[in-house]
């Protein structure tokens, strides 16, 4: 079944912002990327760190971020899934509960390179696997 839409985790969005392979998922294949407002805020907070780490002008990184065609979802849209996601990830990173809950609410696969999100009833695609799937369409 072709992958037309995914829920993006903060780590793949940060990778896309700095022009890594994750950007191809959006620009070359037109996959709809849904994201929790929580993760949008998280990514925005890390933009200066990423710009410095990769020696990129902060203004360029911020512009790239604003230009990514993302479908942003407020917490209210997936709130009823959030408590379970937090319980499922209690021993891991609780911030990961937001993309997991949104993926469950939208019944979409999760695009993440974070192995902590695997094994919770939502199909997870790391960037490399997602690109391989998309290239095989």
Image: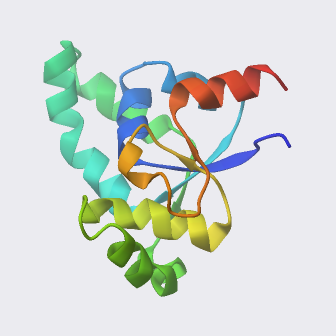
| The image quarter in which residue 135 lies | top right
Nearest the viewer among 80 and 56 is: 80
State whether residue 12 is above or below residue 109.
above
Depth order, front residue of 24/85: 85
Q: Residue at x 86, y 43 (%)?
A: 1
> Is 92 left or right of 49, judged from the image as shown?
right
Residue appearing at x 59%, y 59% in the figure:
122
Count of marks overlaid on the render: 0
- Give the x, y percent position of residue 112: 46, 42
Q: Nearer the viewer, residue 23 or 57?
A: 23
Whole-percent x and y of residue 76? 47, 83
- How is the model colour-coded? rainbow
Relative to 12, residue 50 above or below = above
Q: Could you tell me if residue 28 is visible in this image?
A: no
Q: Residue at x 41, y 73 (%)?
A: 85
> Can residue 13 be seen at all in this image of the molecule?
yes
Left or right: 86 as drawn, with respect to 110: left
Does 82 sit above or below residue 120? below
Q: Looking at this view, name the residue that lies furthest to the bottom.
A: 80
Quadrant where the image shows the C terminus? top right
Side of 48 where 35 appears, left or right: right
* Residue drawn at (52%, 67%) of the image: 102
Q: Quadrant of residue 93?
A: bottom left
Q: Position of residue 30 (x, y in %)?
A: 71, 34
């Amino acid at each position: 079944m072709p992958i037309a839409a995914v829920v993006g985790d903060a780590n793949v969005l940060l990778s896309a912002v700095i022009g890594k392979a994750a950007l191809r998922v959006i620009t070359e294949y037109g996959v709809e990327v849904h994201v929790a407002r929580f993760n949008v805020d998280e990514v925005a907070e890390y933009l200066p760190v990423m710009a410095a780490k990769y020696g990129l002008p902060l203004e360029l990184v911020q512009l790239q971020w604003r230009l990514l065609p993302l479908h942003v979802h407020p917490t209210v849209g997936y709130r009823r899934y959030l408590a379970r996601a937090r319980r499922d990830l209690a021993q891991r990173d609780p911030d990961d509960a937001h993309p997991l809950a949104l993926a469950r609410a939208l019944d979409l696969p999760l695009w993440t390179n974070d192995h902590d999100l695997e094994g919770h009833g939502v199909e997870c695609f790391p960037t490399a696997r997602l690109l391989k799937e998309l290239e095989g369409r």
